[in-house]
Amino acid sequence: MKSVDPSSLALVALRLLAVDPGLNGMRLRARSGPTRDRLLSILPDLPLPLPTVRLHPGMTEEQLSGGVDITRSLSAGRLCQSRGLLSAETATYLLPMAERTPRALAARLAAVLDAREESVLIALDEGIDDEALPDCFSERLAFQVMLDDGGGLTDFSPFAIGGDPRSLSTVEVPDETLKSVVGLARQLGILSMRPVLQAVRAARASAALAGRARVEEEDLILATQLVLAPRAMHLPEPEHGPDASTADPAPEEQPEIAKGESVPEDVLLEAISAVLPEEVLARLRQSRPGQGLASGSGSGERMRGNRRGRPLPSRPCRGGQGARIDLVATLRAAAPWQMLRRGQGAVTRHLVQVRPADIRYARHEDRSDRLLVFAVDASGSAAASRLAEAKGAVEYLLAEAYARRDHVALIAYRGDRAEALLPPTRSLVQARRNLAALPGGGTTPLASGLEAALRTALAGRGRGMTPAIVLLAEGRANMPRVGVPDRENAFRDALGVADAIRAKSVETLVVDVSRRPQSQLQDLAVRLSAVYAPLPVSDARRLSRLVADELG
Amino acid sequence: MTQPFPFTAIVGQEEMKTALILTAIDPRIGGVLVFGDRGTGKSTAVRGLAALLPKIDVVDGCPVNSATPEDCPDWADVKCSKIVARPTPVVDLPLGATEDRVVGALDIERALTLGEKAFEPGLLARANRGYLYIDEVNLLEDHIIDLLLDVAQTGESLVEREGLSVRHPARFVLVGSGNPEEGELRPQLLDRFGLNVEVSSPTEIRDRIEVVRRRDAYENDTSAFLKRWRAADTKLRKLILSARERLNDVDTPDEALEDCARLCLHIGSDGLRGELTMLKAARALAAFEGEESIGRRHLVAVASPALRHRLRRDPLDETGSGARIDRAVAEVFQ
């Protein structure tokens, strides 16, 4: 099957949304460009719910839900409410730069989509690489389409194709169809039930659009391409060897399928291959189940503060130390009361009467500080030079730390335990003093080292930092967490801790400093979903650059 | 969404359904926290349960759903004393809600136009005698959660602001749901929820097909689907009602108390809240099953939801908290 032009898929998705707004919407992953612009320009011609409302990820609660319209209230002398953008019963929402949506807004929009069947949201996701929409939100949008640049969209007619559209409820969905959708979703590793339900719904809408009385193969293929394919976690095992490449341009004729029978899943799988870009397919084929699931880390976590960062809506609270009054918000809070307060016969005739309850404090949201936990192998003969490198790297990083706002901790493991040489700090002086004398030699308790690193990382996270672990390892683990030296147990323990680290989504970098790269450490890196970097001949400067590049 | 999906038509997810039913029988159990993957029917269950519950008698026009005219708060100034039947209130708390909207605030309109100080009740007042539902509770701002849990525990909302001093009853079952991957709740807050259930997507292919089949039938012809499930819903409603009546007659033998205490000691849960919740939940379950006294079976059944969130965390223990409770149950009860 030849590959499908994503822009025409997007157009079909828009048509389906017009037929059944209960499909909630579409995530259109595309950079701003002529194809996207042309696609959006036909939105007004489609019978989508009205009005069309443009949102923005930075919108405040007041803009969304409405509130007192201060300016109008003051000039009119009576209370005027402004309507929030989300207050319309039905609407088509357009959300550009959707990948920047904060989680709170995403959850708010998800609630709106849940509550109002007739509302549609089109999220324009302009993210690159890992940037993506918050999950609670993208999950509710039935369709996901990735537009590539320069896609040749020829048919821009906004009108339905084929026969007369019929109403949704008259379309029959055969039981076999349900079964094949469920089976396919399972093969693709989709656990949530929502995409499955959405796929069935989309197939029904597609049949209704084409005026068919029951859902047939092409509806199902369309639903698979639009709903299930983009969410696939992995591709099912191919039955005829791995070299049956899906990129193979030679299309084989599909055997005719008797009407009413369930659509063979390989037809649907092929349909999937047709819509996914080549690199995504390659990634899916490689990925083992369960890998690539580590989400929720990466882009430094958010935290609230009142000093710097992006401003959040201010709120009335008691000002602690260093809290800053938001003067404009305070005046706004006081404004509607002015008439009333004068009427109450206040003693003084100040121009503006501000009471304590009006005072609003500024709040800001900021990227949290990062904590780099170095876990360094201090065992064996080469310990001294390696520790010197680690110390040097720590000092380099700390020297830059003020600008990058990094905290650094250092853990050395040797003998039968791990030792925290440097608690999380930003102080270069403290680091130099603590790192001055370092013993070396002994067995290699890799698991204990990782465990100590994890504990430090989690403690740092508890204090609002975003932790990352840098493992500097040489040689094989030969000391389990408890007991006597034993290579096999030692490595098994290390893998166990690695799973725990991954489960907590702590970002990790494995630096192999042994002369010859170790397969054991590569396995460990895979288990950690970590970047593996062999660095046989290293110096402190290169190490610090590596850390900055990989974890930056 | 006028007609929610019927509660009894939800496939599987027995633990979540049972927990919700138990809080419907005895609201003093103190809220349910449902944690789990997306698309597992968390919100569907809450909305379905509300539709299933019997109507309550309220004074017409009372902002806090009082049962009798004497119970109406003074500030509400309720003139009418007509009693009407209303569905059990289920109030959604949107994530972005401000404090003003949650607890209530000065009625700006009356203040501006009439120059009166009047209280405009918030969501907590509306949720009195019903449910307060928060989706994505783990993303809610901390100060709102603190406030909610405080009110949920005392059953009364006290508003002291903008020159107002108002108190009103706010007894509701707090139901929170969320996905732990997106952020966890602080342990102190976890502890305040009575029951904690974990849900996951059904893994049996048969169940999954059944989910899709029912949902599709519901979306396609809602009224026919509701009619088909009405009998089951009615039966469950009757069971809940009779369990409520029997609740106070259920015996609590000393062995049950001792079992609770031993189990809680064994798993090392903090405080006594674990025991109390477990006991209340077991009593509700016994009443639901028509038993005369609490048996060990009931305790075992509610141990996981009542204690799961009160365990000390260990980042290296990969076994789920549910499995750890099961192990403890097996060790203590042999």
Image (cartoon, coloured by chain):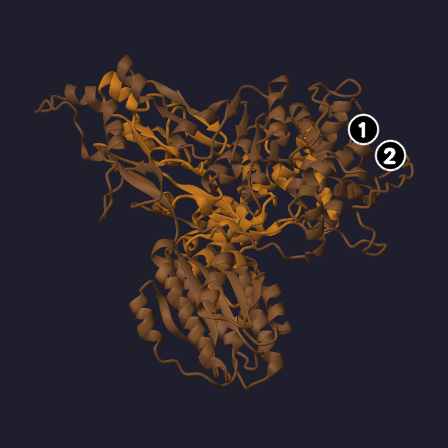
Chain colours: A brown, B orange
Tag count: 2
Are the residues flagged by discs 2 and 1 in contact, CB closer than 8 Å?
yes
Compared to residue B278, the image places residue A221 above or below, namely: above
Q: Nearer the viewer, residue B306 or A490?
A: A490
Left or right of A399? Residue A502 is right
Q: Secondary structure at mark 2?
A: loop
Q: Position of residue A389 (x, y in %)?
A: 44, 73
The chain to which mark 2 is attached is A
Instruction: Characterize the local packing of mark 2: few (<14), some (14-19) or many (20 or more) Cα atoms within 10 angstroms.
Output: some
Marked residue nearer the N-terminal end (2 or 1): 1
Which image quarter holds the N terminus of chain A?
Answer: top right
Residue A29 sits in which quadrant?
top right
In the picture of the structure, the residue carrying the numbered disc 2 is A260
Is residue A250 among the parts visible in the rendering?
A: yes
In percent of the image, x 33 and y 72: which residue is there? A432
Q: Position of residue A495 (x, y in %)?
A: 59, 70
Tell me the CA gap for discs 2 and 1.
Answer: 9 Å
Left or right of A123? Residue B168 is left
Left or right of A315? Residue B290 is right
Type of residue at label 2?
Gly
